[in-house]
Image (spheres, grey):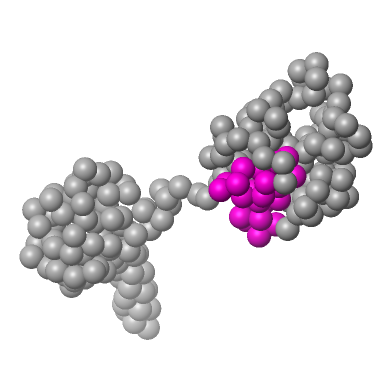
Amino acid sequence: MRLSLLMTASSLFSSIFLASMVATPAFADSQSVILHQGSTGAQVQSLQHDLQELGYFPSSVDTTTYFGSITAKAVSDFKTAHHLNASSSVTDQVLSLIERDAKRSAPQPLPIAQQIIAKAKTYLGLPYSWGGTSPSTGFDCSGFTQYVFGQFGIALDRVSQDQATQGNPVASMNDLKAGDLVFFNTSGYYTHVGIYIGNGEFINADDYGIRIDSLYSSYWSNTYEGARNVLS
């Protein structure tokens, strides 16, 4: 009985030990090779792209569908960095490691407010046009905000007075967040609108065209009417 128990315990320990070894990256090359130097196809190009994202495949070299010497070196460098053997062969597990690392290193998309601001800045210098609602015609203030937000599926009313009723009110200038609509009394209530971009600045279409102004300038601070958040 004692011998049987010892053998059972030994077998259990061996199974756990072997399973743990297979689960570690050090044994990534124990599987069959799926890509190697001379391989071709879309999977090779995807591999090159991931290695390029990770800095192993030269950014100055276009990816292709051929697994050549450049790809081989990139794979070898990746495997060396991950304490695998330095061969250029790619198994399923090595490919999974590369794809995982590439996914982790991929840049995350900008928050919607930053995307809107980046889009708005592409029109800097465009001339002001009364009633203008597109880049081809030029913009007036509310045409500009309506157009920019519309590029992201956010529908704003046509005129600033109506836009001032949309979304949620911002309590004070100190509570402004990037992407908020800011309103001014230039010739009557809510007659001008712009997009707050942070650091006390906003982008707008005024008589000088699309430009960035400071909320704290004497003119804009004296005409500031309030703000609305239409993104939340």
Q: Is residue 117 left or right of residue 183?
A: left
- The residue that appears at 81% across and 48% down in the rendered structure is 159
Q: Tell me if residue 66 comes above or below residue 11 in the rendering.
A: above
48 or 143: which is nearer to us?
143
User: Is 173 drawn above or below residue 95 in the view shown?
Assistant: above
Q: Quadrant of the N terminus?
A: bottom left
**Relative horizontal placement of residue 114, taking residue 70 as reference (left or right):** right
Q: Position of residue 65 (x, y in %)?
A: 18, 64
155, above or below 136, in the image = below
Vertical position of residue 177 compared to residue 218: above or below: below
* Rendered image quadrant of residue 202: top right
Is 31 or 225 nearer to us in this picture?
225
Residue 144 is covered by the magenta coloring:
yes
Specify whether residue 73 is painted magenta: no
The residue most toward the top is 218
**Residue 146 percent across, percent down from the top left:** 71, 50
Q: Which residue is depicted at the point 53% across and 40% down?
A: 122
In the picture, residue 181 is in which quadrant?
top right
Q: How many marks?
A: 0
Q: Is residue 24 visible?
A: no
The quarter of the displayed image where residue 18 is located? bottom left
Query: Which percent across, then down, holds residue 184?
Result: 84, 33
Decide if residue 157 is in sight here.
yes
Front in this rendered view, residue 165 or 61? 165
Horizontal and vertical percent for residue 75?
Answer: 19, 53
Q: In the image, what residue occupies the spot 76% across and 18% down?
A: 217
Q: Nearer the viewer, residue 44 or 194?
A: 194
The residue sitting at 86% across, 26% down in the picture is 223
User: Which residues lie in the magenta part?
Assistant: 132-154
